[in-house]
Image (cartoon, helix red, strand yellow):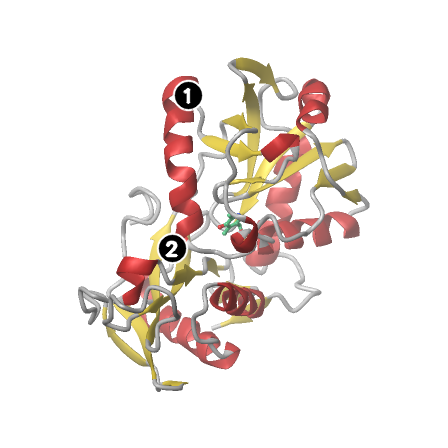
Amino acid sequence: MATKPFGSVICDRMSVSVFDADRFNDHDLVATDSLPLHPAAHVLHYGSACFEGLKAHRGSDGVIRIFRLDRHAERLRISAELLCLPDPPAELLTEMVRDTVTANIDDVPRPPGALYLRPVLIGTEANIGAAARPSRTALLYVIASPVGDYFDSSRTLTVAIETGLPRTTPQFGQAKTGANYAMALGITRRAAEADGADQVLFAPNGDVQETGASNFLMIDGNRIVTKAPDGSFLHGVTRDSLLTIAREQGYDVEERDVGVAELLARAPQVEMALSGTAAVLAPVGTLVHDGRRVTVGDGSPGPNTGKLRETLQAVQRGEMPDRWGWTTAI
Ligand SMILES: *Cc1c(COP(=O)(O)O)cnc(C)c1O
């Protein structure tokens, strides 16, 4: 199952809760076949949607663990607020994610695969007149997908740097919303066609932020440099986890602004990588800037990237002690 393209296999059961009037109703497990959605639904016209992405891992001990469920629940609430959607209670989302894993437990792949979980919150009010106000009704649901690696970790990525067009708008930098993905779509497709780029690194006015779906890290020996959290980018749970592990392993973590000029100048001597639930920590081998190609290190996956990735996965799979209470066993 996990050898199919990432995200193309969806499990049979999903958890659903309807928000009407002023509360989220009791959640149900239902068949993942369709949603009750009116063609005039707010989300289809005015984009009231946000989502999360997290994983359940099957450990070598057979135990299935959900990684940092509380953090993802918290972040969905931040996105909901930015999208003017009703605030999903953390306990509700936690239960819905757990129920979804339990209902599809036989579909949780063995490592390196995992069960990818996708909570989604959308505005459902059937009213095309509600263009300038929030949807009064909403739907929260959690679907699951057995996945393998998002990127083939044995090869490095080609990343095009975009300094002209932004990934998002100032008010949505920290929202996990389809609107941001839509903004990046055309830019990413053009970079793929013109430069053979796998991803686009957005650096408006030279300020390195992140790619369309993952955070960006520069690793120079035992020093990790990455942008400090601000409103301009999505604060990845993977980023936070990797930095926490790295500090514990003796790396120096430098959270600060990084410019494109510094990136290009240091590329030959350092490692660069993309972090995210899907990407884990994926090595970058080539940067493309204004049509010029710059090799990162020697162009192959770097040792620190590999080490940090393996340590994170060992915690996720219960092969290393979870000192931070990050995992929820099912
Ligand atoms: C989901 C996402 C990430 C990665 O976040 P994780 O919590 O590490 O999975 C990074 N950037 C954007 C824009 C995202 O949507």
Pinpoint residue 178: horizontal percent, then vertical percent.
Answer: 39, 52
In the image, taking residue 321 as reference, residue 78 lies left or right, namely left
Q: Nearer the viewer, residue 325 or 142?
A: 142
> Dot 1 surroundings within 10 Å: few (below 14), some, or many (20 or more)?
some
Q: Mark 2–mark 1 contact, CB under 8 Å? A: no
**Which one is earlier in the sequence, the residue at label 2 or at label 1?**
2
> Dot 2 surroundings within 10 Å: few (below 14), some, or many (20 or more)?
many
Vertical side of 265 occupied by 322: above or below = below
Of the residues shown, which amino acid type is indicated by label 2? Pro
Pinpoint residue 259: horizontal percent, then vertical percent.
Answer: 70, 30
Residue lying furthest top = 292
Visible residue check, residue 75: yes
Vertical side of 304 occupied by 238: above or below = below
Visible residue check, residue 118: no
Q: Nearer the viewer, residue 48 or 73?
A: 48
Residue at the (39%, 69%) spot, across then down: 133
Q: SS at mark 1?
A: loop
Pinpoint residue 91: horizontal percent, then vertical percent.
Answer: 50, 81
Residue at the (64%, 35%) spot, across then down: 208
Which residue position is annotated with label 1?
196
Looking at the rendered image, the disc whose residue lies closer to the viewer, 2 or 1, is 1
Q: SS at mark 2?
A: loop
Vertical side of 159 occupied by 98: above or below = below
Q: Which mark is residue 132?
A: none
Of the residues shown, which amino acid type is indicated by label 1? Gly
Q: Which mark is residue 109?
A: 2
